[in-house]
Image: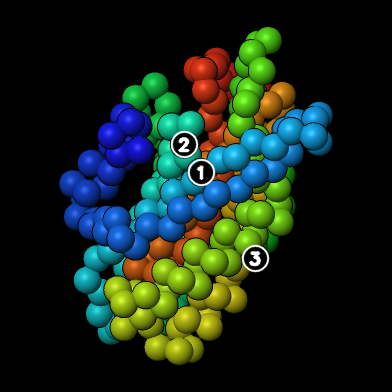
């Protein structure tokens, strides 16, 4: 996908220039095959790659920032950034980075806001979009909520415990970060709501690993290209 997707290369270059290192051996790749929309007899195999960033971090630093990039086999790509506090260890802010018309559009939310506001409220704040696919049958389909949760859990557990991330976190730090799994799932739900008016869509899940701490966002893309317009002026 690094060779095939110009959007993936763009995000990779952009965040690498900001000092984030992306170690491809740390990437997690998932194959999922949900039923096609309105046709339970047809499945649509999809590949999704999650690439975490790494920066040298000291436990006694007050916080650190990390970015993760995800790419789907359809060329859909999205990035998520998190700020991780160290005393105690927890994600205090989540930022979604989406590419539109060759520009990165960023939407940020604090952990308190994510916890206190409804998913509908946050989806409206970030902006809702409708994807018009015309008459073209869309061959890809999104993972269902169970599959998303499984991918989140596996990626989070494996990345936060790998040789890059594990030395950063004390045991209580890992436990604290893992307790935020509901917020990760909610962040994914918000993205679904933002594109809920799309007649057919596929999902690319972005796992941002704060040198191990993983959050997920969902971006919707299409193949062939489609017109994306705000659902609400």
Q: Compared to 166, does 154 lie above or below?
A: above
Q: 156 or 177: which is nearer to us?
A: 156
**Sequence-first disc among 3 and 2:** 2
Name above or below for residue 55 compared with residue 219. Answer: below
Where is mark 2, residue-wise?
73
The image quadrant where one finds the C terminus is top right
Query: Disc 2 on helix, strand or loop?
Result: loop
Question: In the drawing, what numbered circle is on residue 4?
Answer: none
Residue, far top: 135
User: Percent x, y for residue 76?
Assistant: 46, 34
Residue 92 in sight in this render? no
**Gap in angstroms between the C-alphas marked 1 and 3:** 24 Å
Label at residue 182 = 3
Residue shown at the point (62%, 26%) measured from the top left: 139
Horizontal arrangement in the rendering, residue 109 relative to residue 55 (left or right): right
- Callout in the foreground (1, 3): 1
Residues marked 2 and 1 touching at CB (< 8 Å) = yes
Taking the spot 64% from the left edge, 60% from the top edge, the residue there is 149
Real-space Cα distance between discs 3 and 2? Answer: 27 Å
Nearer the observer, 152 or 179: 152
Chain-order first, disc 1 or disc 3? 1
For marks 2 and 1, give the CA distance.
5 Å
Residue at 49%, 46% (x, y): give it.
48
Residue at label 1?
47
């Amino acid at each position: 996908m690094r060779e095939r997707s110009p959007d993936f290369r763009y995000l990779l270059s952009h965040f690498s220039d900001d000092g984030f290192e992306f170690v491809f051996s740390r990437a997690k790749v998932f194959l999922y095959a949900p039923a096609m929309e309105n046709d339970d007899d047809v499945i649509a195999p999809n590949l999704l790659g999650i690439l975490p960033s790494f920066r040298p971090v000291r436990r006694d630093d007050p916080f650190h920032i990390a970015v993760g990039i995800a790419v789907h086999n359809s060329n859909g790509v999205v990035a998520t950034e998190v700020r991780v506090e160290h005393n105690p260890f927890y994600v205090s802010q989540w930022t979604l980075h989406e590419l539109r018309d060759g520009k990165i559009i960023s939407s940020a939310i604090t952990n308190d806001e994510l916890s206190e506001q409804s998913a509908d409220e946050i989806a409206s704040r970030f902006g809702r979009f409708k994807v018009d696919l015309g008459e073209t049958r869309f061959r890809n389909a999104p993972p269902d909520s169970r599959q998303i949760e499984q991918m989140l859990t596996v990626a989070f557990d494996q990345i936060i415990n790998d040789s890059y991330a594990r030395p950063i976190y004390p045991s209580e730090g890992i436990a604290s970060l893992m307790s935020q799994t509901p917020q990760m799932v909610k962040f994914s739900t918000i993205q679904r709501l933002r594109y809920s008016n799309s007649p057919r869509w596929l999902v690319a899940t972005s796992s941002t690993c704060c040198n191990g701490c993983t959050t997920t966002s969902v971006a919707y893309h299409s193949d062939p290209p489609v017109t994306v317009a705000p659902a609400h002026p």
